[in-house]
Image: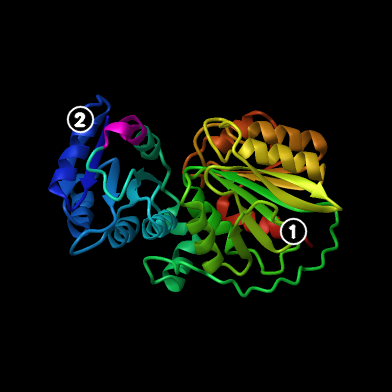
Amino acid sequence: MIRILIVDDSAFMRKVITDLFNEAKDFQVVGTAKNGKEAVELVEKLNPDLVTMDVEMPIMNGLDALEQIMQKHPVPVVMFSSLTHEGADATIKALSLGAVDFVAKTGGSISSVDGIKNEVREICRNAAKANLKRFSKLSSYNFLKEKTQVTTMPKNIMTTKVVTPLKTGNNKYKIVAIGTSTGGPRALQEIITKLPENYPYPVVIVQHMPVGFTKSLANRLDFISKIKVKEAEQDDRLVPGTVYIAPGGYHMRFITKANDVFVNLTKDELVNGHRPAVDPMFESVSAVYGSAVIAVILTGMGGDGAQGMQLIKNKGGYNIAESQNTAVVFGMPKVAIEKGVVDRVVDLGDIAKELISFTI
């Protein structure tokens, strides 16, 4: 039984969401709160297995409440987010602060959740399994507190980062590819913020995320990192010292033109239930770069990425998996490890150091 606390300033929405969970036999609503202050108090009092959290609330908003909960009494939190620019930015900040996942509201408000009931319940079932034991030990949590005091990012961020790639004595590798899902934004933050601005390889990333949220993720990572980060666009040329995040709704593959490699975005069928999916990206970098690939599989439900890692392994590339010690959800790394395609298992806090070590 998953004991759940519902946080929303609307009495109507608290009733709607309560009914949604009461219809399922594996959930028990143990309490409701109408603002963040009540939520923080009830988390300590009721010790729920999961919290659903709205963002905009009086007295204390959802982001402030989430931050306090993660400091005082870490518990899996699922955010309810609107499909707006501001809503997407707030969601990405919430995920970087420790929220496990989010529900994208259909429309500005969810006066009806009939169409997404099963999706909401499945997201919450998965989130309740999250491992938050190591949350307070992640260095980028404190870094984020110091660097980002705004709730939303500017709508138009003009990057001024000039990249002069680091000269490396190791010419074997030419690209880093990272795949992740649930818990990924915080894991990516832990890695990307530690890479130098002159990192000598391009970094390509698939984060399972719907349309409208990957741009906010890229903007926030760019804002708090030394290395340049952007949402990938069709025909982007891959250059060293730049991170490319696959846009929601598109698979990200790569093509070669005149000795350069370019992004190729497609709306092909879902793979492993996702678009973007990790396997198509891993398969493509393997085909284009052969043995010159460093692949990383991070926290996430399911097994997306394991098949692509098999191809990278067959070509002589190097595969890294996040360890069970730090993975919020040890699904995707576990499948890859059990498949026997992983060269090294690394705690999240050491992955950036591992990636930098290949350039020395």
Q: Which amino acid does label 2 sit on?
A: Asn
Q: What span is in magenta? A: 113-121
Q: Which residue is drawn at 81% across and 37% down?
A: 315
- Observer-nearest of 321 and 100: 100
Q: Is the magenta stretch mostly helix, strand or loop?
A: helix
Residue under circle 2? 22
Label 2 crowd bin: few (<14), some (14–19), many (20+), radius 10 Å: few
Above/below status of 332 relative to 232: above
Indicate the position of residue 324 as horizontal and vertical percent values: 53, 41
Residue under circle 1? 201
State the quadrant of the N terminus. top left
Q: What residue type is labelled 1?
A: Tyr
Task: Locate residue 254: give its quadrant.
Answer: top right
State the quadrant of the C terminus. bottom right
**Does the magenta segment cover residue 274?**
no
Q: Residue at x 17, y 55 (%)?
A: 38
Q: Which residue is drawn at 58% across and 49% down?
A: 347
Residue 213 visible within the image: yes
Indicate the position of residue 305 as horizontal and vertical percent values: 62, 36
Q: In this view, does 323 lie to the left or right of 295?
A: left
Which element is circle 1 on? loop
